[in-house]
Image: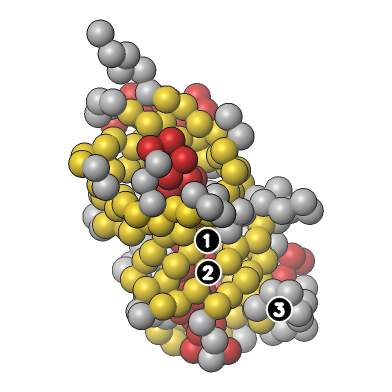
Amino acid sequence: MQSTTPKRFIVRVFATLELEGTTAVVYLCDKTLSSKDMQTIAHREAAPATCFINQQSTNQFHIRFYNTTKEIQLCGHGLLASAKVVGEVKGIASFKFQTQDTVIQARYSSQHKEVEIAFSELISVAVSPPAWVNSCFSITPNSVFQAGSNNGYWVMEWPQASVLQDLEVKTKALIEHTQRAVIATQQSDDEQYDYNFRYFAPQHGVIEDKATGSAHRVLMSYWHQRLNKCNFKARQYSKEGAELTGRIENGDVWISGNVDIQR
């Protein structure tokens, strides 16, 4: 009788020799687990993201993501980690992930051991800075944009001369004022990067994320309009640090970066 015990993988994403990036635990499941069981496992793993994959057909997989306290609607680094597992373990070059509310295209290159995932563009719309901005941040942003629904994103840009890693965020005030995550960004003054960013979502259990693929998706569209280019390399200034790459092609945003299965 074939075992139904899920196969477990630890995957490091967006790391370099100098930057730690982040990790995801990926379970390749033969049967569907209950939401309660997945949350229990994710709590035990205590990873930034724990991903559960079920194969639906040759090139289609259902996926769900959890952190230690709740289910995550969409997780960029979890998708990349899962794509690396599917590509290497299943030997599939092109496939799709069915999330709770969308379908994500993924590609794996066996020659280069690289993966990338595609999102539709999520356009940021300029808005007047909300009255609470000054009470939440130690430095006032230059401009403020919104992307996505009411529980989507604030995109806030700081001057290039600002030291983004010195930005202080009052998380309790942020939770009181908005359900949107905050992406703090600036154009990079380092010639190897196009832009820098940090990501805060205390409303969703993440005070500051180590490495955030979903924010990179939003920012590629944002900086595409400002820098007039399609290929990007970004630095995330979390404590751990991360490096993210990607491109915009035919209206799709392709996210990539270093992805390594550790065990």
Specify the quadrant that holds the N terminus: top left
Report the amino acid beneath label 2.
Gly
Q: Which residue is mark 3?
A: 188
Q: Quadrant of residue 50?
A: top left
- 10 Å neighbourhood of mark 1: few (<14), some, or many (≥20)? many
| Residue 131 visible in image | no
Q: Position of residue 170 (x, y in %)?
A: 62, 60
Residue at 73% over, 74% down: 192
Residue for badge 1:
256
Between the C-alphas of marks 2 and 1, the distance is 5 Å
The residue under the point 25% across, 29% down is 32
Give the Cα distance between marks 3 and 2.
16 Å
Q: Which quarter of the image is occupied by the C terminus?
A: top right
Query: Which mark, by number, is residue 246?
Result: 2
> For the residue labelled by badge 2, is the local secondary structure a helix, a strand or a loop?
strand
Q: Real-space Cα distance between discs 1 and 3?
A: 19 Å
Q: Position of residue 149 (x, y in %)?
A: 32, 68
